[in-house]
Amino acid sequence: MELDDLKNDWEAVSNQTSKQNKLTHKIIDQMTQQKYDSKINKIKYPEWVGAIVCVLNVFYIAFNFSKLDTLPFQIIGVSTSILLLVMAAIGLMSFNRLSLQGDLNRPYAETIRQFAIQKLRFQKFQRVNAFLGYLLLVGVVMLLPKLFYKKDVTDSKYFLIFAMSLGYIFLVFFSKWIYKFYKRSINQAEELLKEAES
Amino acid sequence: MVNKEAFIKAIQENEGLIYKVASFYTDSKEDRDDLVQEIIYNLWKSFESFHQNSSLSTWMYRVAMNVSIFHLKKKKKKVNQIPIGEDVLNFPETARDEVEERLQTLQKHIKDLNLFDKGVLMLYLENKSHEEIAQIVGISKTNVGTKLSRIKEKLKQQISKQQ
């Protein structure tokens, strides 16, 4: 199939499309309403739910802080809380950046450039978040026995061996997947940026 | 105050353009209808800023294509759109089958092109001159020629791989 065949296919689609008279006055009017805008905004809710879960966990740690009776555990408690807050902020910030902003009337190449830059930034934020996620896992493993059973993580060597082995296996597979996934996405975004700037 | 009547008239006169852009950037009827709604909503939002520095169709292509880039990122997250009358957004059954089939063939061939190439190719298939493509995309006329020959080459390779 050559480009001319594609053109023929496209012309056939175009002819069929222009024969239809689909958009009535009422439909167009509906599409311009504010209520449509509010529906679109709903896609931000999952990001907010993630952030709220992080904040609730911080409250849980703060409320049970008295259970962390030694300085090392208090440091882990504070660090885990900070991590949770940073991850919530990164999640919200990176999502908000990946959206169409500014003048819609600007040339296509400029929007592609904006899109590629946002995507690169988004991927870098996500990569940082994935790394912080692993640190969080370590923090949570240390804090869980203390917060729920008032026991030190070293009290049960089985728990420690189990949690650390599982954590290590998780780390190996997770980091391999993260590297592969983000490398491909970042390469695509970089290629797009190069294309738009050439 | 934006004149809604003028806007509705402009949309009705150019609805084919909106449907074509939406068809090019999506691969299912559901996504296409979502994108049509989003394009019209964004055209309405920026209608006030259209000062006839360019032609109406150039402005519409720009907005529609700009919206399409970001719609691709959103489409994975399910959004419930306002229900639009089924009969209004549907092609008649037989015509739709034919259109869908041709669109699927086209999508199969262009799926590996990047967003930039897709945009340039769509305008080329729309029989736009190099000058018009340059104006909509925002690159030089000579660059359009270079990009097009590169796209043709990419497509040839892709199609021969698929056959």
Image: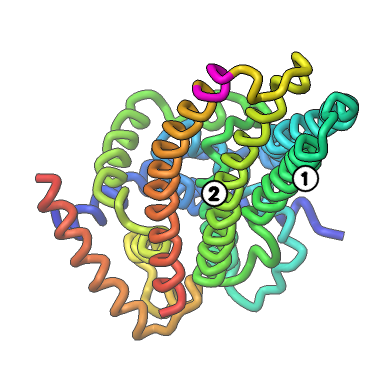
Specify few, some or many for label 1: CA neighbours under 10 Å numbering under 14, 14-19, or 20 or more: some
At label 2, which amino acid type do we have?
Glu
Disc 1: host chain: A
Query: Taking A82 as reference, is B88 above or below it?
Result: above
Q: Going by the image, does A50 lie left or right of B118?
A: right
Q: Which residues are magenta?
A: A157-161
**Residue beneath the point at 30% across and 38% down:** B104
Q: Secondary structure at mark 2?
A: helix
* Residue that numbered label 1 is attached to: A82
Identify the mark at residue B15; answer none if there is no mark: 2
Is residue B15 magenta-colored?
Answer: no
Q: Quadrant of residue A2?
A: bottom left
Query: Taking A38 as reference, is A57 above or below it?
Result: above
Residue B138: percent from left, percent from top: 50, 76
Question: Disc 1 versus disc 2: distance between alpha carbons?
Answer: 51 Å
**Residue beneath the point at 46% across and 52% down:** B21
Residue mark closest to the camera, 1 vs 2? 1
Residue A190: percent from left, percent from top: 43, 66
| Near-viewer residue (B5 or B118) | B118
Q: Going by the image, does B139 lie left or right of A23?
A: left
At label 1, which amino acid type do we have?
Ile
**Residue beneath the point at 23% across and 73% down:** B149
Is residue A158 magenta-colored?
Answer: yes
